Image (tube, rainbow, N blue to C red):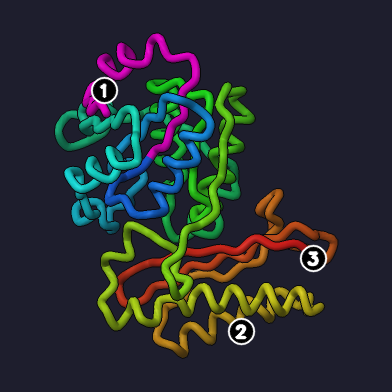
């Protein structure tokens, strides 16, 4: 496994590779990330994993400074997973006009309006930051395949749209969410949870499961189901952000004509913001 820190060295290492699979991450890796690597290995002999905590996707009051950085442990996990290359650039390497304080990234990807809904409503500019850094990484790695987790369903949708609309020669593969035994979606931010919070964190997933079952049983009052789930979470000590039933094909608010659905949820348990989603058909 090669550890590479610069764009020039990365391009040199990849120049003779015809088929590259890429897994972009922000580190603090867990079993969900390793599953992405395993899927990537099914599509290419050369697998590149990036570890970069991207400042452009964090708001001024978010956890950029405290976001967990576990590079040495991450390297060991990726080596055990037989990763080909781990790309660990600095902020200076990723953002050419960074002056030590400001990124000065004046050219960014403007995502579609759906980026301002769901997670985007609470995190203005987040998906512009995500799309911009992913575009930069695609330009550096030049992968034929890129693998993302479906836990971040809205992010995956936006990346797919970016690839389609910019005619990028990258096949985007979404991988099912890996969960802890109680149903909690694995996330780098789960480490913020106390032991008591972790014991109740699967309540978000159970709220989404309840909606799926209700819809499959014939309930089409989506607004009522969403509000009921939010109220239940709030009564259990959460601060709910959104619970929303959407078309999994367009991510627009679901109508009774839609049969391919996704229910998405975001809520805070203490100071930790968790997200989850379930796709289903009716």
Residue ID at (37%, 30%): 48
Q: Which residue is mark 2?
A: 228
Q: Which residue is mark 3?
A: 282
Which residues lie in the magenta part?
A: 1-24
Q: Secondary structure at mark 2?
A: helix
Q: Quadrant of the N terminus?
A: top left
Residue ID at (20%, 44%): 71
Is residue 253 shown left or right of residue 45?
A: right
Q: CA distance from mark 1 to mark 2?
A: 48 Å
Q: CA distance from mark 1 to mark 3?
A: 48 Å
Is residue 102 shown left or right of residue 165?
A: left
Residue ID at (62%, 65%): 263
Examine the rendered structure and indicate whether residue 43 appears above or below residue 191: above
Relative image position of residue 248 (x, y in whole percent): 68, 54
Q: Secondary structure at mark 1?
A: loop
Q: Is disc 3 surrounded by few (<14), some (14 to 19) or many (20+) residues within 10 Å? A: few
- Queried whether the magenta region covers residue 250, the answer comes back as no
Q: Earlier in the sequence, mark 2 or mark 3?
A: 2
- Queried whether the magenta region covers residue 12, the answer comes back as yes
Relative image position of residue 246 (x, y in whole percent): 67, 61
């Amino acid at each position: 496994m090669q550890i590479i820190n610069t764009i020039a060295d990365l391009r040199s290492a990849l120049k003779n590779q015809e088929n590259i699979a890429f897994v972009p991450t922000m580190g603090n890796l867990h079993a969900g990330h390793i599953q992405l690597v395993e899927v990537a290995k099914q599509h290419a002999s050369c697998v590149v994993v990036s570890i970069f905590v991207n400042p452009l996707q964090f708001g001024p009051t978010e956890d950029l400074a405290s976001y967990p950085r576990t590079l040495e442990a991450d390297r060991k996990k990726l080596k055990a997973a037989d990763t080909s290359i781990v790309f660990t650039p600095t902020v200076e390497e990723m953002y050419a006009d960074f002056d030590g304080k400001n990124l000065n990234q004046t050219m960014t990807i403007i995502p579609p309006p759906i980026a301002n809904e769901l997670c985007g409503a609470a995190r203005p500019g987040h998906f512009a930051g995500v799309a911009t850094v992913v575009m930069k990484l695609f330009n550096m790695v030049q992968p034929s395949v890129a693998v993302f987790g479906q836990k971040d369903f809205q992010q995956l949708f936006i990346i797919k749209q970016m690839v389609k609309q910019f005619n990028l020669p990258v096949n985007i593969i979404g991988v099912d969410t890996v969960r802890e035994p109680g149903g909690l979606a694995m996330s780098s931010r789960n480490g913020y949870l106390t032991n008591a919070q972790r014991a109740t964190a699967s309540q978000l997933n159970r709220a989404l499961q309840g909606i799926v079952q209700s819809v499959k049983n014939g309930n089409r009052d989506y607004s009522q189901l969403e509000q009921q789930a939010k109220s239940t979470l709030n009564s259990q000590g959460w601060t709910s952000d959104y619970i929303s039933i959407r078309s999994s094909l367009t991510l627009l608010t679901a109508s009774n004509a839609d049969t391919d659905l996704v229910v998405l949820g975001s809520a805070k348990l203490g100071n930790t913001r968790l997200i989850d989603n379930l796709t289903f058909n009716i």
